[in-house]
Image (cartoon, helix red, strand yellow):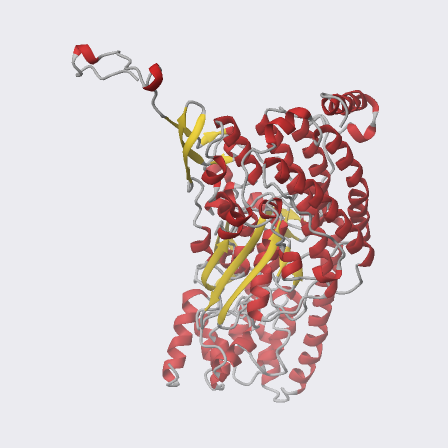
Amino acid sequence: MGFLGKGLLEGMAVTARNFVGSYFDKERLVTVQYPEERVEVPENSRTFPFLVYDGTADKMRCVACKICETECPPQCIYIVMERDEKGKPLQRPKVFDIDISVCMQCQICVEVCPFEAIKMDNDYEKSQYGRFDELVEHLPDLLKSNEYYHKVKPSEATIVDAKLKADAEKKAKKAAPAAKPAAAAAPIPAAAPAARIVIPEDAPFNPEQRAWLSGFLSSLSPGVAPAAAAPQVASTAPATAPAEAPAGGWPWHDPGLGMAQRMDLAKTASFADKLMAAMAQTDCHACGYDCRGYADAIAGGAEADLSLCLPGEAETQRKLEELMKEAGKL
Amino acid sequence: MIQPLTEPAENRYTLTPGPEGLIETQTLEVSIGPQHPSTHGVFRMDCVLDGETVVQLKPVMGYLHRNHEQLAEKMAWLGSMPYTDRLDYFNSMTNNWAYALAVEKLAGIKVPERAEYIRVIVAELTRLLNHVCAIGFLLQDLGAWGTPLLYAFREREKILDLFEAVSGSRMMCNYMRFGGVRVDLDDKMLTAAKEITGRFPKFLDEFEKLLTNNEVLLARCQRVGILPKELAINASISGPMTRASGVEYDIRKVDKYGLYGRFDFRIPLGDVGDVYDRYYIRVLEMRESVKILQQALRDIPQGPHLAPEVKLRNFKVPTGDGYGRIEAPKGELGFYLVSDESGKQPYRYHVRPPSFINLTILEDMCLGHKVADVIIILGSVDIVLGEVDR
């Protein structure tokens, strides 16, 4: 080991080298002078969630299915679905709050969202002067455009866009052949004018109202194949279109309809169809199936839990229990 | 000691001569912590001192209790994953792995090969950053203010930058999923990992030159806080602590979980079991970790990074119980899980934290040493209070 103090001197030499090096050696110049200088944030970096909209802020992708609210480990998300004056759900959130003092930035809400509606931001400068209301983000704070998403996460956003486009095309393709047989299956002359009355193009309705009306009116006119309304819905609200519906089937599969109307449409249908009609028809997969799959699973006995339909809330659960009781299965 | 005023006047302020004519002495009770920088968090040591010598020491834990286990029993399986990050917040990657391993054992999930390689890579990088920081903090406890710790942090930061690019967060990675990892490592990240691995031995050489032969370090650490081999085994100490005492026990070799059977590495062993051995064993383990990293980065195959059959939501686990354990940087980290009929959340969830169990023999190591040595003995155990209290 040599003389006493050799180790000390060697150590001093190391610190001296580092000290001198910290003036010119790039490897030892490690301090970043924040806030004058900033480290570039990697694309995967995450801080707090935001909601994506396409184009204008009212075209948000979120349908208020509440999957993220349920899955959020620290329970920092609070959602209330928007309803019209009749109490019919409008498939978008009225309240969407995230308490960022509770949020632990785990990204599980992003992973579970089937609509690519909630994404992680990488903005880390969120300091506020208060620690209560100031740290709760409401719907207007949370809504960011798809362009913003492209800016913060370019490659991820491109993949998501491609996926959404492919989904929409698939849905449109499925909806198109459904319309043709529907038209062909309505040869009764009386039905044709009835179908024409359903929704005049120049009627003063917004797309959601039109979609709802189409379903409602088609349920009132018995001769009309209800699927005639399907392409209309598909073209106005592609995200919630009943694309999977076969020709003439599942007229209740329209998220614009209320529970009473859906049950009315499914009056004569089979037991599984009735169960399906009790659901919220968003195909949000909150239960782990689409609406059809969940109904079939309950009817077939594979799924015993009737509380899984999150967008349907207590209404759906009550209806399902009622139907199961009627059928003597509960 | 000042006598209470109720004492008779003739007894007040008198010093009775002890044996051999010395003044009679008393033991002194000192509470170190919970807010004390050397306790690495909120941890308290009730010491009884005779002069400066420790005659009794009682560790007091629980100041950071967060109900982790009970919370996990109310939550879906995946929901606990981000909470495991917060156990030992230096090593979130290995915490994730231990939990994922336990669930995978319980549910019988097969992990793809590439995912296993990625897990080995991030776990060994975690070991590097944990050990380098453990040494930095130990030196901080010794009174070497700043320098070694900041050198350690400089290296750690490079690894954390990579973790942020990979998982999205520097420390709370939440990276593993049942049946693989969340994000694949792309070429850029692999290159960064290779660069870190390539440079690390050079840094270690410099770090060792600064510390290993330093006379002050030797004088303070050698023959201090000796942990005998038998006690280490009987108290079920694990990790670098037990290997410094000469017990050849490393779960990477014993269990060969993941792909550790494939890699060529050795287990460094100490022979005295003092603070210096525990310091040096960590340096040697880092060198072995670099070896594993080089092999893993060379051999990593192409393929999926996540088992495709695993559902993210409504993930259910068959009834039964399972124990998954890994060699975390601090020792054996295990998760014991029981699943009941519902299968949606654990019926029982128990963590076996290495820091907590390694801390139980603190008194045995400290008795007879000076109070200043208590601080470095605690530093050499390498605890994180998030894991001790859960």
Residue B336, x across and y down, in percent: 50, 61
Is B22 situated above or below A137? Answer: above
Residue B286, x across and y down, in percent: 71, 44
Query: Is residue B197 visible from the viewing direction of this image?
Result: yes
Among the 4 quarters of the image, the one containing residue A184: bottom right
The residue sitting at the front extreme is: B20
Is A115 situated above or below B196? Answer: below
**Residue at 48% across / 45% down in the picture?**
B388
**Left or right for B131, reference B381:** right
Depth check: give the residue in front, A132 or A258. A132
Among the 4 quarters of the image, the one containing residue B7: top left
**Left or right for A23, reference B141:** right
Residue B160, x across and y down, in percent: 69, 42
The residue sitting at the bottom extreme is: A188
**Left or right for B306, reference A79:** right
Query: Is residue A60 visible from the viewing direction of this image?
Result: no
**Residue at 70% across / 55% down in the picture?**
B120
Residue B209, x across and y down, in percent: 75, 30
Depth check: give the residue in front, B366 or B157. B366
Depth check: give the residue in front, A266 or B362. B362
**Residue at 47% across / 40% down in the picture?**
B364
Depth check: give the residue in front, A110 or A256. A110
Q: Quadrant of the N terminus of chain B?
A: top left
- Image mark count: 0
